[in-house]
Image: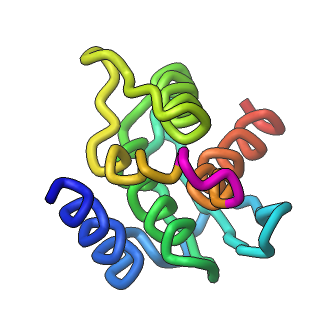
Amino acid sequence: MLQDLYRQLIMEHAKNRRNNRKLEGEHTHYKNPTCGDVMTLYWKMDEYGKIEDISFIGEGCSISMASCSIMTELVRGKTKKEVHEKREAMEKLIRSGERPDDSIDLGDALSLEGVHKLRARHNCALMPWQALDKAFSKRY
């Protein structure tokens, strides 16, 4: 039953993508190295080092597009440090199925937990997080 709810949530994010738009400001292109899904990630940082706004455009499977939608909702208003903590928690969730402790809120991203059983889809679920890593490693 919980798996059905998670599936529905993933499909909802894939069909009705949140923050799916171009945004003036910084951006980075990213291509999933294993399957060819692509995205462009856009963001603006405020003067306090928090993500003021974030969006994406892209094409890919339901898992990657849902993950992009979910990630943009999770990181808005967060600092680079907070984003890094969420990124590490997502990596563990997807690679090993390990849920984060209560101090890290992954929200709808927990719906992607079952992807850890599908090794070929790990990079689909992690694609937006890898794009954000790429963006932040170059600029911040």
User: Could you tell whether 94 is left or right of 140 in the image?
Assistant: left
Which quadrant of the figure has residue 25? Answer: bottom right
User: Is residue 47 at all visible to an observer of this figure?
Assistant: no
Q: Quadrant of the N terminus?
A: bottom left
Near-viewer residue (97 or 48): 97
- Label total for image: 0
Residue furthest to the left in view is 1
User: What colour scheme has been applied to the protein in the rendered image?
Assistant: rainbow
Q: Position of residue 92 (x, y in %)?
A: 55, 29
For the residue pair 125 and 20, the one nearer the viewer reads as 125
Q: Where's residue 22, x and y in %?
A: 56, 76
Quadrant in which residue 30 is drawn: bottom right
Quarter of the view holding residue 128 = bottom right
Q: Is residue 100 left or right of residue 135?
A: left
Q: Which residues are magenta?
A: 116-120
Q: Is residue 62 magenta?
A: no
Q: Residue at x 65, y 56 (%)?
A: 127
Q: Residue at x 58, y 68 (%)?
A: 24
Compared with 45, 87 (above or below) is: above
* Residue at the (33%, 52%) spot, across then down: 111
- The rendered magenta stretch, by its main secondary structure, is classed as helix
At horizontal 31% and vertical 67% (from top left) the residue drawn is 7
In this view, the residue in front, 62 or 69, is 62
The picture places residue 53, in percent across and down from the top left corner, at: 44, 54
Horizontal relation, residue 122 to residue 2: left or right: right
Q: In x, y percent, where is residue 119?
A: 67, 51
Q: Name the quarter where the C terminus is drawn.
A: top right
Whether residue 70 can be seen here: yes
